[in-house]
Image (cartoon, rainbow, N blue to C red):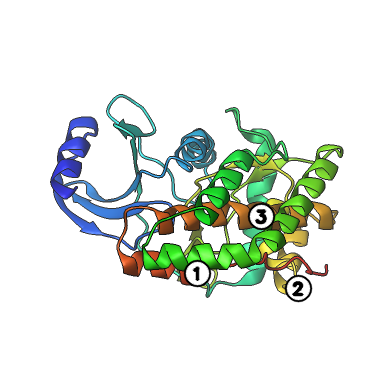
Amino acid sequence: MKLNLKKIIEANYDLNVISISDAPRQFVAQTFVIETKKGNVFCKVVDKKLFIPGLIASLPALYNIHELGFKRINHPILTSSQKLYLMHGDTLIVLFNYIDATQSYTYDDFVFGEVLAKIHDLTDRLTVSVSKESFEFKHKGVFENEMTNIVNSNDKDEVVVDLKSLLSKKQNEILKFFDNFLRIAEKCRKQKWHMVITHGDAPGNILVKSPKDFYIIDWDDILLAPAERDLWFLAEKEKFMDGYKSISPKFQMNKDVVNYYIYSRYFNDLIEYWREIAGEHSLSHKGKNFQQMNVKPQFLDTNF
């Protein structure tokens, strides 16, 4: 991959690559730090088909936010032909500006609330089209097929066998959650929402230089959506909500849309965990995904 990646980058960017080193593996992507004669850049390589369309659709908005002068984000680097990304076969390759900071949760909650509110306030200034929340679970068929395939699997792989056993016991419970999800989604579709530019998973994707100096990264699935899509993770943190409301004082959290996003995250994660376990990976990789998988949605009883 590294030798091919060097050739691909030098063929498509105005960059001379000195070295390529591994960065921490992400759930969605392989990542690399690319040392070039012009300085370091960050490279994301994605071969998971489920995530590529959303990431591609997000790049114009992310670049637009950068053009508007917002500094607390990473942003894509244009290719020599002024494109935001490359496709190499079925693999997506994107270069980003390099931020010399550590991924961490040790940031100031009040400032983080302020930052998210300021990003949301940029919505009306965007000059590119952005996908809009439809409250339709686009992977409904994928979820149903993946569960059926695993429950009926004859695979002798020990982790797949463990997963099959677990799902056989928990299938009715998971399907009950799924029915609840579809019911909440239908309820949300019938309401009108104030839509803002959202990240979808900001709290876990922060590069921190100091508690008040940090950058939001991994904008893989930007949507125009209710603000709750960015807020449900930290809804119970008073300092965070105080920071958000210092910029958007009229905001009120809606529990239905919060639960929609909790369920959406839960079922998208389930699909990807199942694929990692059933795919051509090492036993340790499969076992790690099995251990990380939750069979019950978290935070549904959050009080605001």
Which amino acid type is shown beneath numbered disc 1? Gln
To which quarter of the image does residue 61 belong? top right
Whether tag 3 and tag 2 are in contact, CB under 8 A, the answer is no
User: Circle 3 — which element?
Assistant: helix
Label 3 vs label 2: CA separation? 15 Å
Q: Quadrant of residue 17?
A: top left
Q: Quadrant of the C terminus?
A: bottom right
Mark sitting earlier along the chain (3/2): 3
CA distance separating discs 1 and 3: 22 Å
Residue at the (65%, 60%) spot, across then down: 171
> Which disc is residue 238 wearing?
2
Left or right, 38 with reference to 190: left
Secondary structure at numbered mark 1: helix
Secondary structure of the residue carrying numbered label 2: helix
Q: Which mark is residue 226?
A: none
Q: Which residue is mark 3?
A: 230
Compared to 64, does 230 lie above or below? Answer: below
Q: Quadrant of residue 289?
A: bottom left
For the point 52% across and 72% down, which residue is it? Answer: 105
- Residue located 70% across and 42% down the image: 225
Residue 57, image x, y percentages: 51, 34
Front disc: 1 or 3: 1
